[in-house]
Amino acid sequence: MKFTRSKKLIFVNNKGGVGKTTLAFNCAASFAKQGYKIALIDLDPQCNLTRLAMGDAYYDKTLFSPTEKTIHDVLRGIIEGGSDIDLSVQFLPIREDPNLILLKGDINLSAYEGLLITAYGQAASGQPLGYFQTSAIDRFLREKGLKDQIDIFVIDTSPSLGLLNQMILLGADYFVVPMMPDAFIVQGIENLGTVYEKWKTLWKNTAIALAGNTETRLVLRGDPLFIGYIINSYNVYSKQPIADHRAWIEKIPEKVRTYLSEKHCRNGLVEASWKNPLQVIQDYGRIPAKCQELGMAIFDLDPTLVAEHQLGTKENIEKSKEEFTNLSNSILKVLSLY
């Protein structure tokens, strides 16, 4: 284990289609290649991270497997009542990499979100049952982190601002925001930062303020650190973003500074988190779709597997290795310092 404790890192955005899951998986695979023990945690009921990590064929074959447990199995005792999280649920290996493991997602995770409607209100009024239920996922990760010596939990969430994502964020250590270079993202940064600030403030002024003698492990910390943003899927001309994308890329830093960095950063990270993106990732065309089919990172793909050996495929795969190495190193640097 390279860190003194497990780190919980989430990739979040309330807008779908920004490449959040693809970035999370490829970044996790890059961490693992550098010797970090990584657990992928799929907390999106759509299970996109699970499908991407396993590959289409294996995912379809094991969708209803009674032996491969999911996040719903972890939470079953909480959801049905009368019991606690199931710490016997094991992570699944991903391909041949001993440093990369997975907790499968489950469409039934929505049942836990339904429970949170009551649980959040109870925690916000200082009731022990509310703390017990809202902290379930966080307690599982902390216990498994110690037992399995996990360096980083890479967590994927759904593109929403619902209660489930609120509890996930309040239990996280760090969050990264993937973005596409377009008008919707620039407008959405303000909404995202404002909502997250409201969540943190309400939790601090209610649940944390009323915790009293409640065990610390049951109370979500409620102060995740924003460590930066990723510009994803820009289109390239002469090795530079096309003019339309470049115009939106130039508008992003000021929005990030005002609504994310100044509200959700601290110490020397504030300026660093908005001035430049953690990484700019180009559009890789059909390559990510092939990677999902096979269950592998973009930079691990054999270019001959891409139909018709598209022009530039080999070069793009090499470029992805450079981009994701830079991205993972940028994130690891922050995780080492904060």
Image (tube, rainbow, N blue to C red):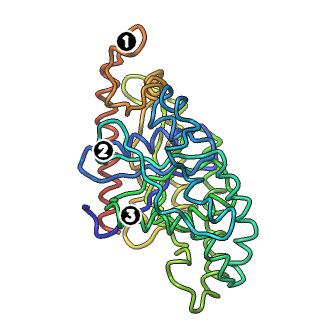
Tell me the residue that label 2 is attached to.
Answer: 326
Q: Residue furthest toward the front?
A: 66
Of the residues shown, which amino acid type is indicated by label 3? Answer: Gly
Q: Position of residue 277 (x, y in %)?
A: 42, 49
Between disc 1 and disc 2, whose residue precedes? Answer: 1
Res 95 → quadrant: top left
Whether 169 is drawn above or below 230: the answer is below
Whether 125 is drawn above or below 302: the answer is below
Whether 17 is drawn above or below 9: the answer is above
- Residue 309 is left or right of residue 252, and the answer is left
Q: Position of residue 316 (x, y in %)?
A: 35, 24
Of the residues shown, which amino acid type is indicated by label 2? Answer: Asn
Q: Position of residue 183 (x, y in %)?
A: 63, 40
Q: Quadrant of the N terminus?
A: bottom left
Tell me the residue that label 1 is attached to.
Answer: 311
Question: Local crowd at mark 2 within 10 Å, few (<14), some, or many (≥20)?
Answer: some
Tell me the residue that label 3 is attached to.
Answer: 145
Between disc 2 and disc 3, whose residue precedes? Answer: 3
Q: Quadrant of the C terminus?
A: bottom left
Question: Local crowd at mark 3 within 10 Å, few (<14), some, or many (≥20)?
Answer: many
Real-space CA distance between mark 1 and mark 2, rounded to the nearest whole angstrom: 25 Å
- Residue 143 is left or right of residue 180, and the answer is left
Secondary-structure class at tag 1? loop
Of the residues shown, which amino acid type is indicated by label 1? Answer: Leu
Real-space CA distance between mark 2 and mark 3, rounded to the nearest whole angstrom: 26 Å
- Residue 143 is left or right of residue 160, and the answer is left
Q: Position of residue 308 (x, y in %)?
A: 41, 7
Between disc 3 and disc 1, whose residue precedes? Answer: 3
Whether 146 is drawn above or below 56: the answer is below
Secondary-structure class at tag 2? helix
